[in-house]
Amino acid sequence: MVKLSVLETHSCRSSYRRLQYLFQEPPHSYRKTSRRVLACTGFNIKLLHDPDGNISTTQNGGYLEKQFKDNLKKAHNPKRTYQAQTLIVSFSPDEFDTKDLNLQAKQALTLVQHFVHQHFSDAQSVIAVQADGQGGKLHAHVVFNTVKPNGKTISTSRFNIHQLRTNFDHEMSQNYQRVTCHSWTNPIHNQQKRQDANNLTTRSEWQQNLKQIITQVKSEVASLKAFIQRLGEQGITVTDRKKKTSWTYHQMVDGKEYKVRDFYQRVNKQTGEVLSTRGLGQEFTKSYLTSYFKQKENEEEEDTNDRKENDRLEKVRTMARDAKIRIARQQRLNQLNRQRSESAQAREQKQRSIKEARLSDRRDSKAKRHQSSVEERRQLEQQARRKRAETQRSADGPEL
């Protein structure tokens, strides 16, 4: 039988862990590929590119989350409870057999990208195609920012899973053959009509509808209290039974009350054999849902702690960079001051040397002039003495 692609949607208090999960975790399985992400794109967001200019399959979750956060600051309530919404599209092996994984990943990305553009072009989103699950099936994750770039929030009704599945079926019927060159068969439209369709009881139809509502509400809220409150808004009440360990769901439909247990098994006490099973199923029990929301709250608390730790580390790194810049700037100033001081000292030394040379020249010149003057006086005195001697000899007359 041909199988359909499956859609899931979940609400997230923070986009940080989800984006980190998509891009920065190692592959969960190497059965089909050793790469975590095979193809990715986005709307109204900046993505990293490889050297060839193509969108890289390796993205930084913190970098993307910062852009989500910038949009969140524009919202009327920046501290809103739910900051992101995720959509998972899991393709069946009949749609993509993964024999040519790289080509089919691009084809899957084209289909999901067109679908998101048709219905969420006004939102900020990131799309990542993967095939690293245990089953090796091709699937796509879409993370939406619940706050649009203009600061307005996206209505939660746009993430109604039943409407999304209907819209995606339409996307596949319209574009699958154009993108993949293969025909797409919708088994829901082609399956044979059930023989007992006219005999289905109203109660069975109500239970199926109740399961769908509970599943949808569970994906939209983050606590057990909010879960029960949201069910009450849709006319569904929950009462305790078996000493408050189990639940019974109630709803009024067309003036008639319907009720069903969450899960119940009648067991043979002697042999342990399960004689009958009633209720909606184990996933609708009080214990399961309590554990589910507790785990969800723990994950969101870890998201918050991780984000705070990341902010703290970023602040420390920023302070370290600022300190390093200040030290480098001070070192440059000190070096410049030393160079200026050394240059000034060199100029002063040169001026002193020139001054001392001039003084030395003046002293030498003065000494030479003095020496010349002394020599000249000595010569004059000698001449004068000779003249006096000659005059004296003339006055005395010749010797007898």
Image (spheres, rainbow, N blue to C red):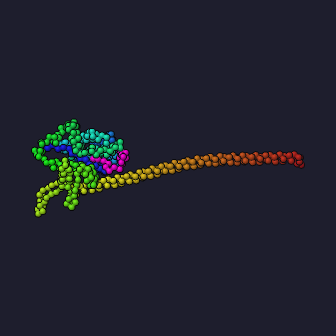
**Quarter occupied by the N terminus:** top left
> x, y percentage for residue 320?
42, 52
Count of all numbered marks drawn on residues in the image: 0
Lateral position of residue 355 relative to residue 175, left or right: right
**Secondary structure mostly taken by the magenta-highlighted segment of the chain:** loop
> x, y percentage for residue 34?
25, 48
> x, y percentage for residue 135?
20, 49
Residue 111 in view:
yes
> x, y percentage for residue 366?
70, 47
As drawn, 198 above or below 225: above
The residue at the point 44 percent across, 52 percent down is 323
Seen from the viewer's position, the closer of residues 152 and 316 is 152
Residue 218 in view:
no
Magenta residues (range): 71-86
Seen from the viewer's position, the closer of residues 133 and 125 is 125
Q: Is residue 243 magenta?
A: no
Question: Which residue, as the protein is rendered here, is positioned at the far front?
Answer: 255
The residue at the point 18 percent across, 50 percent down is 256
Seen from the viewer's position, the closer of residues 104 and 70 is 70
Question: Which residue, as the protein is rendered here, is positioned at the far left?
Answer: 195
Q: Is residue 79 magenta?
A: yes
As drawn, 166 above or below 237: above
The residue at the point 83 percent across, 45 percent down is 387
